[in-house]
Image: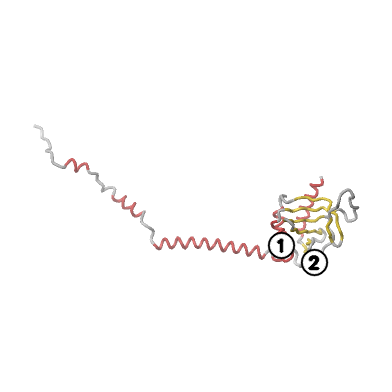
């Protein structure tokens, strides 16, 4: 004789209800992970961010001070406007001068520059505004370390080339005396002596472009 389990009302319905007991720990963990951070943790994060911003600001101030201090003598020599032109003038040229004793070319009007009480003829203009190495060359003129200990001196002897920094109608004209290492501000009529490394660097830089243009 077969025995069958009697139908119990609601038993099938009860069996169909899912058991959530196994999911309880995971749901609790999810709830905990979504909980807001404690006030102490948030405070530590804010302090860390502020510390990083403070360090960045301190580094920027130090860099500004360092650049300011390392260029004070150069700034005094060139003046604020001259120093700005050296740093940012969009046009930089080498003006190659004809020998002082050369006869003027009667076929065309001459461009002249007055140097050391003498009118000198500009034989050629060489644009070096985009020349490789110009940025470093500019920077060297604005660094105090590029100059010897003595201050401004009387204008050096007449040169064979003029370095021109120009922006609009503003310009700065410099000449170099390679024998003494002096750089002269033509408008001011005063000179400073460059250290040998800087003077040699400028001599080679100018000679390279003058020679290249002449070939």
- Residue 24 at x, y percent in the picture: 28, 50
Residue toward you, 75 or 111? 111
Residue at the farthest left position? 1
Q: Residue at x 10, y 32 (%)?
A: 2
Residue toward you, 90 or 71? 90
Quadrant location of residue 3? top left
109 sits to left or right of 12 = right
Give the foreground label among 2 and 1.
1
For residue 101, which numbered disc appears in the image? Answer: none
- Residue 107 at x, y percent in the picture: 88, 48
Residue 208 visible at all? no
89 sits to left or right of 182 = left
Residue tagged by mark 1?
Answer: 81
Q: How many marks?
A: 2
The image quadrant where one finds the N terminus is top left
User: Please, what secondary structure does the residue beneath circle 1 have?
Assistant: helix
21 sits to left or right of 39 = left
Residue toward you, 119 or 30? 119
124 sits to left or right of 14 = right
- Please tell me how crowded label 2 is: few (under 14), some (14-19), or many (20+) other residues with Cα within 10 Å: some
For residue 153, which numbered disc appears in the image? Answer: 2
Quadrant location of residue 40? bottom left
């Amino acid at each position: 004789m077969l025995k069958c389990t009697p139908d119990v009302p609601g038993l099938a319905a009860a069996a169909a209800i899912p058991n959530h007991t196994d999911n309880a720990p995971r749901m609790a963990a999810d709830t905990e992970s979504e909980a807001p951070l404690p006030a102490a943790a948030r405070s530590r994060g804010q302090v860390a961010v502020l510390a990083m911003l403070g360090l960045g600001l301190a580094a920027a101030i130090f860099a500004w001070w360092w650049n300011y201090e390392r260029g004070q003598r150069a700034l005094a020599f060139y003046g604020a406007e001259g120093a700005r032109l050296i740093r940012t003038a969009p046009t930089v040229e080498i003006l190659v001068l004809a020998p002082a004793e050369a006869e003027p070319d009667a076929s065309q009007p001459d461009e002249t520059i007055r140097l050391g009480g003498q009118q000198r003829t500009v034989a050629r203009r060489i644009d070096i505004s985009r020349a490789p190495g110009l940025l470093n060359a500019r920077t060297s003129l604005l660094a105090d370390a590029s100059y010897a200990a003595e201050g401004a001196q009387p204008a050096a002897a007449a040169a064979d080339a003029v370095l021109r920094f120009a922006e609009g109608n503003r310009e700065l004209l410099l000449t170099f005396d390679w024998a003494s290492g002096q750089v002269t501000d033509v408008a001011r009529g005063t000179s400073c002596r460059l250290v040998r490394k800087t003077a040699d660097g400028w001599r080679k830089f100018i000679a390279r472009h003058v020679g290249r243009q002449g070939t």
